Image: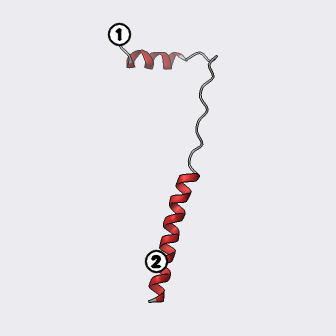
Amino acid sequence: MWLLALEAGVAMFLLIFIVWWTMFHGRTPETPPKEDQKPTEHSKQSQDSDNPQ
């Protein structure tokens, strides 16, 4: 019986650890592009095709 309780404790620890790891060790947020940068031709074309007027 104590072996089942130990196994359940280890499983609970692993579950909490995995949730904690994914919450706080994710990807860092990307920095926004600078205002003075001009968009490239590729991004101009994709913006034009997304918004037909």
SS assignment at label 2: helix
Q: Amino acid at mark 2?
A: Ala
| Marks 1 and 2 close (CB-CB < 8 Å) | no
In the picture, the disc for residue 8 is 2
Task: Look at label 1 and name its amino acid.
Answer: Gln
Residue 34 drawn above or below residue 22: above
Residue 52 in the image, given as x and y percentages of width and height: 35, 13
Q: Position of residue 48 (x, y in %)?
A: 42, 15
Marks 1/2: CA distance? 61 Å
Q: Quadrant of residue 45?
A: top left
Residue, disc 1: 53
Instruction: Look at 48% across and 16% down and name the residue there.
Output: 44
Q: Position of residue 42 (x, y in %)?
A: 49, 19
- Above or below — where is 29 with respect to 20? above
Classify mark 1: residues with Cα within 10 Å, few (<14), some (14-19) or many (20+): few
Q: Is residue 27 left or right of residue 52?
A: right
Which residue is pictured at 47% across the width and 83% down the height? 5
Foreground pick, 35 / 50? 35
What percent of the width, then of the height, locates residue 21? 56, 57
Q: Quadrant of the N terminus?
A: bottom left
Foreground label between 1 and 2: 2
Mark 2 surroundings: few (<14), some (14-19) or many (≥20) residues within 10 A: few
User: What number is the disc on residue 31?
Assistant: none
